Amino acid sequence: STHFLESKAENAWLKEAKGGFKEWFKNFTPDPKPLYKASEFIQLFKGVRTLFTHCVYLKEMDLLDKNLHSI
């Protein structure tokens, strides 16, 4: 299982590279950038049975594998 898009801050970070996550990451690096987009994160679980938890801000439902992915 994996937590995914459960907050406004996470959504803003992965989709627009801004918001609370960016400010927090500035504590560790001067110019933080997301390592992946939301759609790319889903692809990390291609072919893997996965429970995506929360997904409050997930709009890319069509990218989930109906046979292997659940929310």
Image (cartoon, rainbow, N blue to C red):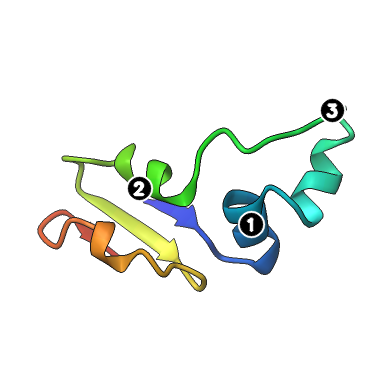
Earlier-in-chain disc, 1 versus 3: 1
The residue drawn where x is 84% and y is 28% is: 28
Q: Quadrant of the C terminus?
A: bottom left
Image position of 19 (left or right of 2): right
Discs 2, 1 touching: Cβ within 8 Å: no
Q: Amino acid at mark 2?
A: Ile
The residue drawn where x is 84% and y is 44% is: 24
Residue 23 rendering spot, x and y as whole percentages: 86, 47
Is disc 3 surrounded by few (<14), some (14 to 19) or many (20+) residues within 10 Å?
few
Question: Residue 28 — which label?
Answer: 3
Question: Residue 10 — which label?
Answer: 1
Earlier-in-chain disc, 2 versus 1: 1
The residue drawn where x is 31% and y is 41% is: 43
Image position of 38 (left or right of 24): left
Earlier-in-chain disc, 3 versus 2: 3
The residue drawn where x is 37% and y is 58% is: 52
Vertical placement of residue 61 versus 23, above or below:
below
Q: Amino acid at mark 1?
A: Glu
For this rendering, which residue is in front, 1 or 27? 27
Residue 18 rendering spot, x and y as whole percentages: 75, 52
Question: Residue 71 — which label?
Answer: none
The residue at which mark 2 appears reads as 42
Is disc 1 surrounded by few (<14), some (14 to 19) or many (20+) residues within 10 Å?
many
Toward the front, the furthest residue is: 16
Vertical placement of residue 18 versus 46, above or below:
below
Residue 21 rendering spot, x and y as whole percentages: 75, 49
Toward the bottom, the furthest residue is: 56
Q: Give the secondary structure at mark 1.
A: helix
Q: Give the secondary structure at mark 3.
A: loop
